[in-house]
Amino acid sequence: MNADIFLWLVQDGVTNGAIYALLALALLLVFAVTRVIFVPQGEFITYAALSLSLLEAGRTPGTIYILAVGGLAAAAIDGYAALRERAWRRLPRIAALYIVLPLAIAFLVAWAAPRKLDQWIQVLLVLAMVVPLGPIVYRIAFQPLANASVLVLFIVSMAVHYILSGLSLVFFGGEGLRSSPFWDARFKLGVVEISAQSLFVVAASLLLIVGLWLLFEHSIYGKALRATAINRVGARLVGIPTALTGQLSFLLAAFIGAVSGILISSITTLYYDTGFLIGLKGFVGAILGGMASYPLAAAGALVLGLLESFSSFWASAFKEVIVFTSIIPMLVWLSLRSRHVEEDEE
Amino acid sequence: MIGARAALVLFTAFLAAAPFFLSEFYVTLMNYIGLSTLVALGLVLLTGVAGLMSFGQQAFVGVGAYTSAVLAVHYGASPWIGLAAGLALTGLIAVGLGVITVRLSGHYLPLSTIAWGISVYFLFGNLEMLNKHDGVGGLPPVAIAGWKLDTGRESYVLIWLVVLAALLAARNLLDSRSGRAVRALRFRATMAESFGIDTARLKLVIFLYAALLAGLSGWLYAHFTRYVSPGAFTVNMGIEYLFMAVVGGASQVWGAVIGASLLTLLKEWLKDILPTFFESSGNYEVIVFGLLMLPLLHRARDGLMPVLARLGRAGRRAPARVVTADPLPRRAGPAAGTPLLALAGVQKNFGGLAAVRALSFDMRAGEILGLIGPNGAGKSTAFNLVTGVLPSDAGEIRFCGGRIDALPARRIARLGIARTFQHVNLVGAMSVLENVAIGAHLRGAKGSVRAMLRLDRDEERRLLHEAAKQVERVGLTAHLNDASASLPLGQQRLVEIARALAADPVLLLLDEPAAGLRFQEKQALAALLRRLRSEGMSILLVEHDMDFVMGLVERLVVMDFGEKIAEGLPRDIQANAVVIEAYLGGIEEDAP
């Protein structure tokens, strides 16, 4: 290996690592707030990436059907609950959020798709389609089980992953898609050539991480999320609705998933089930960081990106094997450190 | 339980008759159901009973299948050698994975098993020796004493005999000393440790058993289909196995059969029917599975097995079987009056808060010592330090002369200290008798393997006999076979005491046994404790109910804000000004 290849691999690793870091943060956030191991995060990546590619080709992505039907299902569940409690006043809000908004987005996308609008408008359309799926998924699948154990929530996660990945194949088909880069330039930096797209990905990730930090430190919603993460019962006692923090954390997760999908869609070809693996790599990154602290999770994700990039050079057939077994040393270390006896809440 | 027995007989009769009247297609389907049942059964024990979760069982199936395939095709080895090698390799990997995850929080095992499942899938698909994604074909059938099992019907016999044996072994395991410990793992691990159960080791044993069942299923699969490729061991298969266990009822052995049957049949049916509705191809059955799981998890989290069991069973459980057996040997306790427990300068901090500060006191054999103080005084923390639930930061704790402050709870239990819990810590679904028998865990020695083979029956009778004796001692014989969760709080506290007594302790530690009891119940409890003392038991009693302890104990140690503020005879303590102030609160000098 010469210096050129080395630097190129580093660049590749850092680019992927930045995306994994974003995902690791979102997954950690959802886990801390709702205790959900959010495996379906990967599907948001897929939906966003493939939707963007389809919009670029002037085709209408099937995501709009998932959004509309999901919204209707959430509206039915919430509406039924409201009717049973005779809380008529909640109905207009439910209709606006879960029926009108998703349908409006769906029609807008259907209208805009064949017109092949500017790339930035397409990105906004993708975000509008994918981000509402977060709260909708939470409302349908997780909110009824807010007090269930981590393990039950994990199974629910898997069921949701099953549904979303099945729908992914139905609406996107088996072919791989790739979108065009946002910025097709290359810079010479000494001996290395850096692609603008990599810079763009890293910058966008950094920007989002700073944004998240600002949200947590300085907004009332961020503080509510932090309070719920630290102590659920305590948060509820001081009047923080845990259903709201749950939906909020899923909204953020869907947003981060969608952004990751948009960023990655121009770097690599994605298939209907690629997002699942990418999302899991976010988890691997979070575990490498000990699954507790946000900065460590981001660092773990970066290490993972580099590991992946270098192993694809040395042993490309075994890249995934190396990536997914990399958690073993971390688990050993965590295991040696733990002394207390673990038990489930009933 | 006649309903259950009849169902079992019907099921076995159906299995015996099935190959004679089912078509080839359905025999094959039954074989797949049997293969899935083996894997799902492992998950029932792992997830439903022990509270561990794995999405990587398909990888163990793959290891079992590929090992035998490679040995048979590349080296011409007999399938039996392949079986031994496959199980050995599966077991080795399971122990390795288990050792690094069973001590961690619940979500690490499922996450790492997903990772392991993905790694193994890509490994199968990329190894030259395994023919990459094409897989290994041309496997020989299994032969038993010259009889080659090369048709589906012949494989059926082998597969279902193995399944039945595994089901019986699992049922036997749950109905044994180890089984009771396993059933306590999920929600009651701290309690289990306090009675000498090594919970991490037990979790490992269950994980290993589940992995071996999966490996066995893989071996059967390989020699039944004669062809092995990575496509059969995808992550989705791992998820489906877990769904099977959940659908059937993850806490019941027979739930594995029900879950495996339902999902296998449903998948087959959906694959037939769904493409007629939709034009494009797709994994529609995956969507349907997911959609079915959601309401099931929302509404019937225990799966379908309990629903079916309720249909078959009328009324209560069978009446108590009175077991007679040789009594278990008893421990020789120290003579009354010799030093038993000594704390010297014991310290415990939680962050900046000193919950226990330089606590010292002594206790002699044969006495009841009361440790009292207002709420938040540090009594329960002191109690947890003595029992090893928490490690102390400084100081010495000695029991019968030996230091115990560095020992974990289960080692301390071995020395003859048994405890009760302030928040009743019983396995709710288990009977009173079984709960109390957990207390006698250390007085038995037969492990999981003997339990599966029913080689533990003599010891089991003696353990249950001992448990029944202790239930009688606290006056609950009438409730011997009731589920412990069905008893009122007062009686549940008595079950706690009976469980501690079943350990044949030298020192009994009671953590607020009178909390939440009614007056009569308190009197009955006091009478029981006096009787225990007259039989020579040493008791350390943590309480904040002054009236309850005053007439009962020889001596009192009073704590407040983590420190000992007084020690002495009950009547001296009652007159002690510092104690009165601690309990009633001082009069603030600048109060208006």
Image (spheres, coloured by chain):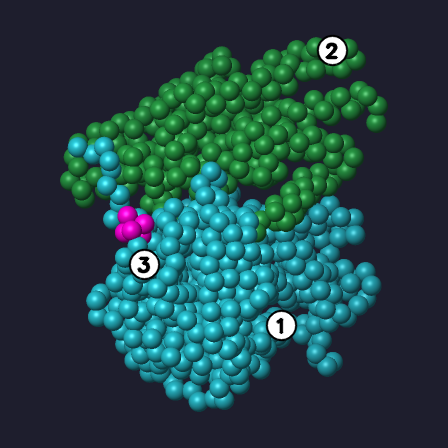
Chain colours: A green, B cyan
Is label 1 on the same chain as label 3? yes
Relative vertical location of residue B264 with respect to residue B539 in this rendering, above or below: above
Q: For this view, does A254 lie left or right of residue A243?
A: right
Subunit ID for the residue under disc 2 = A
Q: Which stretch appears magenta?
A: B577-581
Q: Could you say where residue B190 lies in the image, as x and y percent from the top left?
A: 47, 59
Split into 4 quadrants, where in the image is the N terminus of chain B? bottom left
Residue drawn where x is 70% and y is 15% of the image: A194
Q: How many marks?
A: 3
> Relative to the observer, which residue lies in front, B353 or B584?
B584
Using the rendered view, name the quadrant where residue B165 is placed.
bottom right
**To which residue does mark 3 refer?**
B573
Compute the Cα span from label 1 to label 3: 78 Å
Q: Could you say where residue B261 lies in the image, as x and y percent from the top left?
A: 47, 64
Q: Could you say where residue B540 lies in the image, as x and y percent from the top left?
A: 41, 65
Using the rendered view, name the quadrant where residue B399 is placed.
bottom right
Using the rendered view, name the quadrant where residue B68 is placed.
bottom right
> Relative to the observer, which residue lies in front, B43 or A109?
B43
Is label 1 on the same chain as label 2? no
Subunit ID for the residue under disc 3 = B
Is B580 included in the stretch rendered in magenta? yes
**To which residue does mark 1 refer?**
B155
Relative vertical location of residue A110 with respect to residue B174 in this rendering, above or below: above
